[in-house]
Image: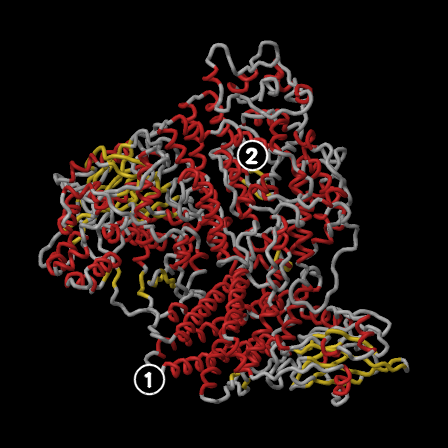
Amino acid sequence: MSERSCPVSGSLGGSCPAGSRSRSASRRLGPRGCSFSGFSQPGDIRSVFNVGRPPGTNFCTVLITTRSPPRWMLMNGYGLERKSINDILYADMPGPDHITQVKNVDTLVAQDKDLLAVALGAPARQVMLRAEAIGQRTGWKDGYLSAEYGFCPPDSNEAAGALANSPGRVWSDLCERMPGCVSRGRVRESVAALPLVEGTEDVIPDQALWAAIVALGMLCSIYRYEDKNDGYDGVSTTTASTRPNVEMSDDLSLELVGIPRCIGLPYWQVSRRMGRAIPHLTFFDQASYNIRVRDPTSVHPYVGRFDNTDLRWPMFGERTEIAFLKGCADTSASFQHGPDAIASCQEHVMNRDIEGLLREMIRLKEILDGMPNAFHSISTNPNSGDNYVSAMEWVRWGKFSAPLSKRCPAASGLQFPPYLVMDAFLGRKKYDSFLGNEGLHLRAWLPSNLRAFIASIEYHYRIPEFVRESGDPRLMGVLDGIIESYTGERGFMGTHRYKVFGILEVAFKTGRTETNGNSGGADTSGRPWEEVHRQFSDAMKERLEPYRGDIPEPHKMRGTFEECRYAAKVLSRSSVDTDPGRSIASVTLDIRDTGITFQPGDRLAVMPLNGWEECAKVAAALGLDDMMLDRPVSLDPKWTRFAGHLHTVSQHGSMAGHQARLTVQDILRRGHLAPLTQDLVLKVHSLLRASSNTVLQVLATDEWPVRGTLGDLLQSAVLDTPTHIWDQAFDLSRQGLPWLTNIIAVEVPRTYSISCCPEELLPSTVDLTISRAEYKLCATFAGSSDISRSGVSSGFLNPPVGSADDHSSLDDELLVGISRPVAFQLPVDGAAPCAFFAGGSGIAPFRSFWQSRAGNTVGRNIMYLGVQNREKFCYEDELREYVRAGLMEVHLAFSRDSRGLVYDSAMRDLVERRMEPRYIDTLIAEQGATVCDLAMSKKQGGLGGYLYICGSVSVFDSVMKGLRKAIYNHRTATMESTDIIINTAFAERRIMLDVFMTPKPLPCNRPTIPLSQLALHTGHRPNTRIWIGVHGSVYDVTDFCPMHPGGTLILKSNAGVDCSKSFDNLAHTNNPEVASLLTKYFVGHLTPKPEFHDLDDLRSLYHLWADYLRTSVEALVAQQFEMDDILGSSKLWFQGNMINILGVRIFYQYQSRLLQSGFSSLFGAKFQELVLKLSFTMANATSHSGGITKLPDILGIIARAKTSPDAVATSKEIALIGQYVCNSEPARFQERGIMDYASKSVNLDIELLEDIREEACQGMDAFDSIMTMEASSGEQRVTAMCSFLMQILERMAKRLEVFYAKLAQYSIYQPAIELNPARTRWDFVRRRVRDRSFFVLARDVAVEAAQPTYTASKETVAFDNVLSRVQQTIRNMPATPPPRPMQLTEQHLARAEVSKDAPSAIEAYENGSAARRISSFIDSNKRAMRRLSRLPASTPLGLEQLMELAGQQTLAAAQGMPTPPSSKGSGRSTPADEIPDPADTMRGAGPLVEAMRRDRREVGSHGEETRAGHVEGRITAAAGVYRCEDGNADHDEQPEHQVAELDGAGAAVLVWRRQRQKKESYHVAVCRKSDESLAPVQIVDKYNAVIGAQVVSQLGRG
């Protein structure tokens, strides 16, 4: 671009003001050759922007050196006379007719280049200054952007206040009272009652635009939500419309179809003024721009903190909505100072100021480091108070925020600016993942200022490019830290992913279909939350790959060498106590020029090196001499990646031209040699061909890992292994020694708390407090000797004083990295009191805490320290200085020393005093009053202090014991109340843990735990335990559940099942802290899978049944979550003293989903898969002996249960509750009855699921017993197993019958428990009179029926009946459309239009998977199934034959409710794939057939008025005979029905004569036969008049 085309230099006569004469041009120009490059705009650029300046003023120097525009800029082109970007670019926006025809609405927004041109191009500071100059005058319609507030509004009340002072106040007033309208069920009526206030400039001022667009967007969304969830969206017996009869906005936009014009028209007008071509609600509309700041002067660290904001206009008014949207706003607000830091970085790149760039990049990294804390404001822990987000209620918010049409952007979290800004800052190039595409799509719809800012840093003066070219290791190190802080596993993106994982797993199991971004849909390849996790991983990899190369899944990098990206050396070791053995030492590492920065609470990950002595033992045993130590080694994939990683670190991040080369010495020093894991010993055992007795002894151990090293094992094994086997196993002549990397794996890093808080901007050293771990060598290697060994890492960093490694290790280079714990940071509020509880070397992180807080904050700092004796009191001198300065209080407990130290507050010193040895729990109990005040929240009357615990697991137990004792002694009367206080502190993240310990060996000689026993420990009932399975071990995590950093629900959602996959996805496998805690809760090992030998059928059934057991357990736990939400809070059911329709709606939708889908997770396709495979196996086995297998009619029992009178009665009761959702008037007479009915219903749901789980557990246990049963053959075992499992499935089906029978006994009509029984009875009478069913009062509805029971069914069916039912299920499942390109918005709307009876995402996923397996199973066994079915061949019949058969049978009309299909018997039915088309049976049938073809019409779901009258009927099959019942109750005459069945042909003709008004007509229906009903193909009368009919296959319809 030439200088004259530049909007800056062009206004100054074509000379660039940045090219100052006093400096070299090379110093002033940026990497792209221009300091203020921008895009040219056609025409006179000066007239467009009206750029002016006083003579002689250097324009660019002003912009660089000032952070706000000077007065001449404001008055001349940059202030009052300037137009907004939207006014320039969107002045001639197309009309509604044109926009309606546009399919890809992304073409309606301006391009980035045009935005940059209007915003005067790069740099980012220029865009920011322009936005600040005209923002307030134009109402910030281009979007909020300022140096001080970033993308947040400078005044959160400005727009809302302006709206309140305009006619648009009617919108904000309705938003304020919307929670009350929702609770009354009067949302649509309230919206429809609004007057029409237009959104034009003369009515709504610019200053009110943001508030207007938020209010109107929320009103349109809540109206659309209420319209779709009006109480007829679930179980319903009527289709009455409850939509207000008002003028709609259908002519304006597709997004506003069905929206009242009183809000649709102003929303359309305001959206166009804001530059939105189509109206849509964004995520930041609901969150960031929908909050009010409590104290605008509370600016540290940023204004929009969770505790400093309120949600201005909640729609539902419940806790989850408020907490979630405030948490999202907090996350975005935490980046408040990010834009200014990025603009400053760009300025320093322009000036090539490395030191300035270094400062601003460190500042940006600090901002990113603090952002993950904002995620913690959203908690899934029910004890977290205002921060609690219920997954169930989050599901409802997802439905509310669904897009208004297929075209408009969804309200996705990717709309938040921090994601898009940081992607641009880091130069992200790849957007191939789903979330990447989503981000690009949503970026186009950001406010104009935000888009211009992002484009200015993406296209110009790219910071990563400058850093790379500078070659400065400090810049490169800080950039690497920024990358890790933003998109690393422990950074912003990683924390976000794990937070989402915890919410989604619960939400998907309880009803959510997908995320707002359409991630994790039920048609994906994995379980939905796992699919979302994978999509997050793909997006993170796209960001990381330019800097890390080809990487594995990000969560697989956690806890591995991938996290150690810097090189450091040990500078010194010094004593921190008076212990002569220096068991605890302060180790100082040199990190100069690495760019490492850290904050208090961080840990340093260190890749340890094996000691030279241990390496020599291995080399000697293997025969490796000194010459061979430098020999290159063949590398497996893991070692190859490690070699590349080493090269990248040595080249300061450069990945160019590296060769994966490691030597024998590298493998020995950096590989895993100790302790001995089972996998390592088995590899040696295999190489030695089981010839070593020593190895066999080690394998016979009672616990793993074994206390010993690879050198110990090899040196012992070489003595008892034949020489030729040893030489073959460890062949030194083989090129590359491939066996070496086979047995020695890459070592994993150890993490140590950082014990310093330096004041310098870029620290040159880091201090660690290392306690040397020691263990006793196992007897296999030590014999009778008592030999002590040091841990690999602690022994290297803090070797014994005077040992060989004490000096030699100082020359070694270590790989290190920063490891940030999930929750172990100082509070943002410096005035908050902090208490530090430590044992021994657990004091390590607290040294950085007190160095950071002492003298810099006003909050109290209290240390509670437990150590063995005075000699091991660490940092005594330093602590005494802080105590004497009045900056700390220190309380000590010596467990093995009577020379005590007591804190004297008057003297401000530690005073000597003799006392009995004691542990830290006793110390805490003595300080009980202070500890209680710290532990209790402010709402509980406490100080709301922060309590930090660091030490081993035993220290953690002792501290928790002391806390409970202190609270019990000083504040509570029961231990239950004590636990509530402690659990609340954990939930509020005010008790934080840093537990360390080398995982202790787990015993392997305990009785194993079968899957059935694990499944029974779900903890869903009070006072029951929660067990989880992880990698073959079982853990009781009941006590840990309230302390879990990720919330309690994620643990509970995995209760009773093997959660190894979730454990791995959350990167816990390589987390030593998690491993340490798990050993504390270890129960035993899982029973291994039985050995089925060559019985493949039995093995397949085992996996299938185990999968069903898991499903039953997960369904039980998920339903318990919903039960807790429905019954757990009175606020859900009552608002003030009136019933809250929100609770009614939640229960109605919950119960409707269960009843309509028929507990699809338990009795859907997966259940039918079991029935089919068991039936096939039994039938196949019997057919070999020539017999005919009679199978229990399991699927028939379920079908009859779902269509029984009890099921009909239950559906009617739920439908009645649904009618109250949008009409709360009658609900006031049934308040307590509805709540009582809901309580009984959900308890029955849980009881049914518990029964199913118990049955599934019995089946699981049978697999362990079947292999011990005496049987003559394997087939006999399989047949016996199948027979037993079929009995269990039959009992499950019977339990469903019992469930409906029990539920049908309950009713919401219970006047005896209502506050005003008389009004309840009178309302009941009035409703019965209105619906003409007054005779119902003659029945006693309060009589309790006998409790239903069940007995074993005596009905049996043939295999073809089972096959037919299963095939019918497959056909009825929603077909998956062929893949086609879909815009993201179209996908979003497809989510919102899910079927009203759709199951949860996990149910849909599992049923879909089961259906595909069934289809595959049928296809692969088609021939055998055809042989077992013995189906007759079908013979086409003409119409004359059909009519002749039709007169052979006459069936009188049935009285009352029709019998459900197959309830009278279970004859063999014809599979649908062999049913001929009825049209084929009528070919050549004469004139009547031709007449039918001329007027053929498919029968719809509703009857149609025609000249032949209105006929509604039900056609059912019973005992092989077809029956039609006239549904027209208004006619006096009764039709005569004649039915003819086509035996085996799969079709039937129904003929009936009708007489009305002395006219007689005959009608014929040709129907397709199915198990449940007849589906009419055509219905014609004698005179070829097409008549309407309604064919209903379920009772209670029609």
Q: CA distance from mark 2 to mark 1?
A: 75 Å
* x and y, in percent, of residue 1122 in the image: 53, 62
Residue 870 visible at all: no
Query: Which residue ends up furthest to the right in the rendered image?
Result: 1558
What residue is pinned by disc 2?
A: 151
**Considering the numbered disc 2 on the image, is that residue within a helix, a strand or a loop?**
loop
* x and y, in percent, of residue 1130 in the image: 56, 59
Residue 109's quadrant in the figure? top right
> How many tags in the picture?
2
Task: Out of 988 and 1354, give the one closest to the viewer.
Answer: 1354
Q: Is residue 243 left or right of residue 567?
A: right
Task: Out of 134 and 911, give the one closest to the viewer.
Answer: 134
What residue is pinned by disc 1?
A: 1270
Q: Quadrant of the C terminus?
A: bottom right
Q: Amino acid at mark 2?
A: Phe
How packed is label 2: few (under 14 Cα within 10 Å), some, or many (20 or more)?
many
Q: Quadrant of the N terminus?
A: top right
Q: Which mark is residue 432?
A: none
* x and y, in percent, of residue 125 in the image: 54, 25
Q: Amino acid at mark 1?
A: Glu
Residue 1397 visible at all: yes
